[in-house]
Image (spheres, grey):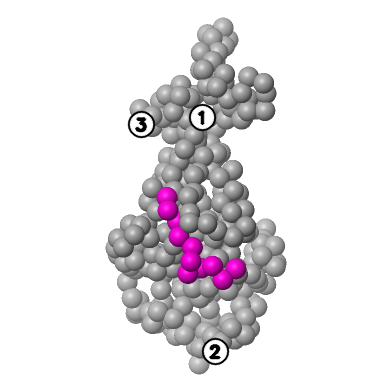
């Protein structure tokens, strides 16, 4: 029998990051190990294993953190055993065996299948009895940058506080350049997560998810330079540097003055340069 295998390093070129795939459960048991080892993992996508028992999680980690990441993964089989997943190594190794033999087992899910799986994992996002998700209402850039992360963290917090079945999201949207997340009431831990990502959203481009450099005025939205140049009519509105905009919040003139005068002042400055 081949050596048990439950993770693999992917052949994907990157100067700063290394890419991995590993098997986990819907409870994301590996997350606690990553936290304990103080390693930051960028989760990208996940698929159900051929028999549906486990998830194939695709992620990346900075090369300087790779040793700690691997140390955390080496503890994963023991954690699986502790939580009653006695077949973890057997199932994951069998999947790798099929891949080696050229049998894919199961094709990636369709877009509709992905949506159903997503709502199965995060039922608190479902819009009434439809197949729509409250996350669909967010700008695409924010969904890319932190959509999966905020859902994952909220689910973990709800599990810890025994509120998973009671929690419901009513609406998510962008308002005044920041995330607005309305729910039916949540424990303090979830409220703190929402507050954290509200602050993060203020400095994330709504179009592409990259760090924002400017904020449009009048209709307030954060954008990066590239999306301002090639963006929609909304993105071409007058704008001010993001640092200048938020610095104005702490001064007596407030945000409104920055919005009203920022674009014209910059035009004058560029003309005189």
Of pointers 2 and 3, the one earlier in the residue sequence: 2
Disc 3 versus disc 1: distance between alpha carbons? Answer: 14 Å
Disc 2 versus disc 3: distance between alpha carbons? Answer: 53 Å
Does dot 3 land on a helix, a strand or a loop?
Answer: loop
- Label 2: few (<14), some (14–19) or many (≥20) C-alpha neighbours in 10 Å: few
Furthest toward the bottom, the residue is: 1
Magenta residue span: 161-171
Does dot 2 land on a helix, a strand or a loop?
Answer: loop
- Residue on which the image places disc 1: 215
Does dot 1 land on a helix, a strand or a loop?
Answer: strand
**Main secondary-structure element of the magenta-colored stretch:** loop
Q: Between 168 and 273, which is closer to the camera in this rendering?
A: 168
Residue in the image at 53% along x and 81% along y:
5
Would you say residue 234 is visible in this rendering? yes
Q: Residue 82 at x, y = what percent? A: 62, 85
Q: Between 255 and 46, which is closer to the camera in this rendering?
A: 255
- Image quadrant containing the C terminus: top right
Of pointers 3 and 1, the one earlier in the residue sequence: 1
Residue in the image at 53% along x and 43% along y:
201
Along the horizontal axis of the image, is 24 left or right of 52?
Answer: right
Of pointers 2 and 1, the one earlier in the residue sequence: 2
Q: Quadrant of residue 113?
A: bottom left
- Residue on which the image places disc 3: 232
Along the horizontal axis of the image, is 48 left or right of 253?
Answer: left
Residue in the image at 62% along x and 57% along y:
188
Residue in the image at 41% along x and 77% along y:
49
Please tell me whether mark 3 or mark 1 is closer to you in this view: 1
Disc 2 versus disc 1: distance between alpha carbons? Answer: 52 Å
- Residue on which the image places disc 2: 86
């Amino acid at each position: 029998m081949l050596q048990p295998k439950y993770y693999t390093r992917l052949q994907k070129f990157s100067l700063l990051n290394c890419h991995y795939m590993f098997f986990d459960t819907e409870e994301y048991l590996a997350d606690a190990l990553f936290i304990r080892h103080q390693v930051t993992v960028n989760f990208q996508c996940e698929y159900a294993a051929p028999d549906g028992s486990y998830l194939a999680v695709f992620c990346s980690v900075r090369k300087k953190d790779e040793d700690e990441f691997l140390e955390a993964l080496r503890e994963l089989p023991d954690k699986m055993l502790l939580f009653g997943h006695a077949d973890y190594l057997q199932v994951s190794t069998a999947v790798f065996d099929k891949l080696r033999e050229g049998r894919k087992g199961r094709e990636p899910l369709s877009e509709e299948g992905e949506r159903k799986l997503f709502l199965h994992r995060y039922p608190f996002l479902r819009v009434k009895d439809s197949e729509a998700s409250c996350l669909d209402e967010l700008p695409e850039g924010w969904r890319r940058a932190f959509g999966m992360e905020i859902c994952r963290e909220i689910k973990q917090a709800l599990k810890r506080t025994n509120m998973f079945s009671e929690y419901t999201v009513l609406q998510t949207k962008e308002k005044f350049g920041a995330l607005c997340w309305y729910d039916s009431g949540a424990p303090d831990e979830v409220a703190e997560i929402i507050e954290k990502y509200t602050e993060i959203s203020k400095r994330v481009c709504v179009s592409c998810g990259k760090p924002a450099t400017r904020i449009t005025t009048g209709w307030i939205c954060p954008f990066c330079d590239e999306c301002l140049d090639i963006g929609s009519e909304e993105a071409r509105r007058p704008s001010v540097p993001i640092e200048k905009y938020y610095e104005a919040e702490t001064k007596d003139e407030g945000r409104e003055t920055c919005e009203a005068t920022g674009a014209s002042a910059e035009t004058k400055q560029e003309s005189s340069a």
